[in-house]
Amino acid sequence: MPAKIKILYLITKSTWGGAGRYVYDLATALPRDEFEPLVASGGSGLLTRRLQAAEIPTITIPYLERDIYLFNDLRVFWQLLKLFRSVQPDIVHLNSSKIGGLGALAGRLTGVKKIIFTGHGWAFNEDRSLVTKIMIAIGHWLTITLSHQVIAVCQRIKDQIKSWPGTKRKVEVIYNGLDPYPLIDRHLARQTLTKATNFTAKPADEYIWIGMINELHQNKGVDIAIRAFALIASKFPQAHLVIIGEGEKRQELTSLTDKLTISNQIHLAGALEDARGYIKALDLFLIASRTEAFPYVLLEAGLARVPVIASRVGGIPEVITHQESGLLFQSKHVDELAYQLEQALSQPQVMKEMAEQLAKHIREKFSQNQMVQATINLYYR
């Protein structure tokens, strides 16, 4: 019987974000008679706990975090060299920018046969100075150069780097995938979310719920959503914006809703474990991100048959066809988002039909099995 292929997955943070879910889905779906997965990350967050529950071995790398600290990063690099020599993986699969660069270099120095880097998004797409963007782009290019193969999670991610020297033949598009998942009954989901918010005037079922599920971070554009909602709130007093998630911008967003005098229609529900299970509570799902690659939450809302309005960034337009399977707007354009919100709230039946089209498209083109099988094929190549 041939030896199992050892795959070492590396990810900077052990939180349950898009990259974390991607690692979890791959590590747990690999055939155990062919592969031996191991996941190393910074911290011991929800990703680590879920991997351990699934009996996937994990390793915590001390001092590994997203921000750059030269001394700590050198310590991380030294630990990676020791880890690679100890584990002797056949494949190192890197996820996220920070560990991507360090891991690719360590892999080359220790003679790893195959180094794969998944681009979950390019940090130069964020709002930064030109000099910083150039430095980040150089870092991404070095990571790609040191890797043997690169996975782009959508075509847009590939298109942004395809003209870079030495990258064209390395990059392959493998879309994130998702299968249908358990959903909480609409009434029960609304009851649970009501307890986490400040609905008081009427029974929760009488409201129109517009929802977001994301970290309260600048990139996610929650402030854009709030400003756009404020423009149509008086016209639709029964509509409420429910935001599930936590993060550094909470106080700033709370102050914004107070300033716009719509705090009675905006509800910050905080973080909820397995938040996607509550999506059926929503009448409309909103993604207002300034930058994205290929968000899992889009697939989650689509499979739940909840109508979607989303910013035209990253791979989102590769999933949603405007006015056929959802509504799109130009990122950061508050007025355009307000217009799309008004259109959606004014024609709920049309939006339901779009939601059915989106669900069908996701089931056919973006299944988890398709993602896993395409990745396994790359491992064997």
Image (tube, rainbow, N blue to C red):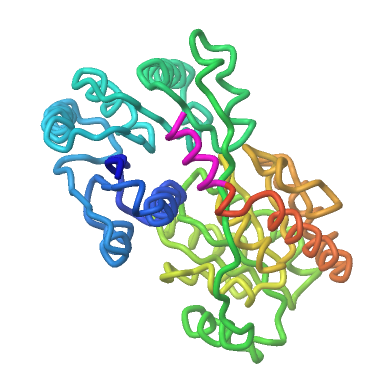
> In the image, 66: left or right of 266?
left
- 110 versus 166 height, above or below: below
Give the residue at x 41% y 30%.
Answer: 117
- Residue 152: percent from the left, percent from the top? 54, 32
Determine the residue positioned at 56% across, 69% down.
Answer: 181
Q: Nearer the viewer, residue 289 or 18?
A: 18
**Horizontal and vertical percent position of residue 215:** 46, 55
Which secondary structure dominates the residues rendered in magenta? Answer: helix
Q: Nearer the viewer, residue 123 or 179?
A: 179
**In this rendering, is residue 268 above or below 310?**
below
* Residue at the bottom extreme of this rendering: 203
Work out whether 262 lies above or below 119.
below
How many labels, in total?
0
Place of residue 226 in the rendered image (x, y in percent of width and height, measured from the top left): 62, 58
Q: Residue at x 26, y 47 (%)?
A: 38
Image quadrant in which you'd find residue 349: bottom right
Q: Is residue 190 above or below residue 155?
A: below
**On the picture, is 275 further left or further right than 307?**
left
Quadrant in which the N terminus appears:
top left
Q: Which residues are magenta?
A: 371-381
Q: Within the magenta stretch, is there residue 202?
A: no
Apparent side of residue 234 relative to residue 137 in the rendered image (left or right):
right
Residue 51 percent location from the top left of the image: 31, 59
The one nearer the camera, 290 or 349, is 349
Q: Residue at x 60, y 66 (%)?
A: 180
> Can residue 248 be seen in this snapshot?
no
Residue at the far top in the pictured view: 165
Is 362 placed left or right of 110 in the picture?
right
Residue 56 appears in the figure = yes
**Quarter of the image where one finds residue 65:** top left
